[in-house]
Image: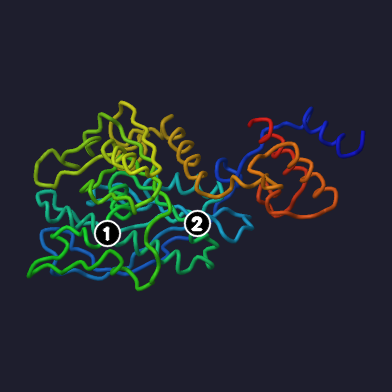
Amino acid sequence: MNIKLIIIYCLLSSLVISQDVRYLDEVFEDVLVTEDVVYGNAPDLPFIFLFEWNTIDIDLDMDIYEPVGDTLDARPAIIFIHTGAFFSGHNELDDVVDLSIASAKRGYVSFNINYRLGLNVLSSYSGERAVYRGMQDASAAIRHIREFHEEYNVDPNKIFIWGTSAGSFVGLHLAYSQDDERPESTYGTTADPDLGCIDCSGNNYIQNSKPNALISCWGAIGDLNWIDQDDNIPTLMFHGTADPIVPFNSGYPFTIDIALPIVYGSNLIYERLQELNIDSELYAPTELHEYWGAVNGNWIGGPNEYFDQIKSDSYNFLYNYLDVFELGDLNQDNNINIQDIIITINLVLNNQYDNLADINLDEVVDILDVVQLVNIVLNN
């Protein structure tokens, strides 16, 4: 038996060990946080949200979480958008901070943004404008990141949004609405300003402002007809069927009064996406709002078991859109098998490199890649 077959035999018999997979598991121990990075500037409302004629321009900022020791220069990114009913909240809430850290440890770059707040719950006009301002800020964040993707070592074609509650409203509206679908309220009145187009606020960068995929936790959208065939943005949704804050089907958001406009929750969004054959998934347990253990973004006794399950489901969903399934398919026959293991072993023995063989993405092809490839073959 030659050396190659001996190595294969040994691997198959004794080296089948658990290997962490980048983007699915925490493969980095430490995270570098850069706080208060400015991504735009926009007019902000006064604290009393009854009028909008006396706005003051403010910087829009975000915190960036990166894995320490990462050598890749084109990493996928997740933009996190916090809860707060467009009235409160910030990017240091427990849940979005923990998600930002968890994502960075998996190899993502996390951009945890602040966005403009301001909602008068007695005004449908104010509610629509609040969501629209949030959309504009998320648009500015995506355009900023794509403009400076080389500086952030980010792949501009793999920028995702992960929103919770009001943050999910922002993500869903940005993903699925266009300028010609703007609510009439966004054009303002004689006293209040026209908010401008979706990409006309925050900064002047000319970049695509749509995310490449979306995760929505207990969110809703203002009009199902805004979702059309051209909006091919994969979407994963989580929503408790007993949610009293944001309707699972349709109803009034955030309050029990009828002043705010009716919105359409995750169940109806999912039906619409399925009707249009847009990749989508919905997890809907019989639970309340923020059922991963938070109240307005803050842990109450710590996250529960749903938080871990939501993270696992989400990272598995995003993994589908990272173009990493080709890793390991050395002969590119769309089938990862023993032939690919042999090719990889040859690379190791000859001290050669092939990016398809670099399973753990450490820029070296070695025995660890062979072990991980064996696990992939045996688990298929």
- Mark 1: few, some, or many residues within 10 Å (few <14, many ≥20)? some
User: Who's the residue at 23% across and 46% down the image?
Assistant: 224
Name the residue rendered at 61%, 44% in the picture: 27
Along the line of sight, the residue nearer the viewer: 243 or 229: 229
Q: Nearer the viewer, residue 176 or 117?
A: 176
Residue under label 2: 33
Q: Provide residue 290's location: percent of width, then percent of height.
A: 32, 37
Left or right of 54? Residue 134 is: right
Please tell me whether mark 2 sits on a helix, a strand or a loop.
strand
Relative to 139, is 260 above or below? above
| Quarter placement of the C terminus | top right
Mark 2, other Cα within 10 Å: few <14 / some 14–19 / many ≥20: some
Residue 251 occupies quadrant: top left
| Image: 48 above or below 290 | below
Upstream in the sequence, badge 2 or badge 1?
2
Residue at image coords 9%, 67%: 189
- Disc 1: which residue: 178
Label 1 amino acid? Answer: Gln
Using the image as rendered, state which of residue 269 and residue 165 is in the foreground.
269
